[in-house]
Image: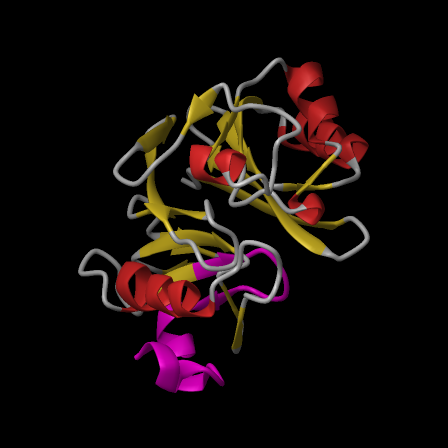
Amino acid sequence: MRLLILKRLIVGPLGTNSYIFGSNESKEVVIIDVGGEPETFIDIIEEKLHVKPIGLLLTHGHYDHTLKLGKLLSYFNIPLMYSKKEFDSGIYTHKKADRWLSEGDSIKVGEITLDILETPGHSPGALSYCSKDVKEYDSKKIDGVIFTGDLIFRRSIGRSDLRGGDPHLLLSSIKTKIMYNPEITDNFLIFPGHMDITSVGEERKLNMFKNYFL
């Protein structure tokens, strides 16, 4: 029985990866980042998936990950969740969170738990969302999933030259929170904020910046 809902939407002017993630058992989902095109989210959630959103999570506050999020918040009447460090830094101040998230917090989506990791570097309050409860994706056995925003990409890493960015923090976040995190194995899939899906193991071997974070 397929218990997972994991839908990637590539939307907005910069081709942002936005995600609908949750449980096909409880029919609860969260939206992770909004790159724009709220009508597309509404259509997929209501007409194709027939699920109930319970929250909108931000990995960080850059415009290409927050575009038009207000329309989804008001339409579904759901809470906004992200890091207060991102708000306090001035990177994203358009709307305060209904729930501030920090390292060690978790979010329940049906029977699935999403754990919050603080992964600054691309922006001061960047977060990643990790779950060990997802054991299969696209008919392949895995150990879990992690939504990294613009921290790490397939064969690359996020920018650190934007306001609030820090290259040393970025590499440290990849190293300590992902590559040398005892809870995360090479068989975790990475769902980034741009470009294709990858895995921790693949990035250990093939990422062009691997010598800086391994």
Residues 11 and 67: in front is 67
Q: Dividing the picture into quarters, in which one does residue 47 lie?
A: top right
| Residue 189 x, y percent position in the rendering | 42, 61
* In this picture, residue 149 sits left or right of residue 14: left
Q: Residue at x 30, y 41 (%)?
A: 103
Q: Is residue 199 magenta?
A: yes
Q: Residue at x 56, y 23 (%)?
A: 96
Q: Nearer the viewer, residue 76 or 22?
A: 76
Q: Residue at x 58, y 39 (%)?
A: 90
Rendered location of residue 194, percent (x, y):
63, 60
**Residue extending farthest left:** 182
**Horizontal side of residue 210 vs 66, given as left or right:** left
Residue 67 screen position, x and y as percent: 73, 38
The residue under the point 18% across, 60% down is: 182
Which x, y percent locates residue 29?
A: 51, 29
- Using the image as rendered, state which of residue 84 and residue 65 is in the foreground: 84
Q: Is 10 situated left or right of 144 in this image?
A: right
153 w.r.t. 28: above or below: below
The range drawn in magenta is 190-214
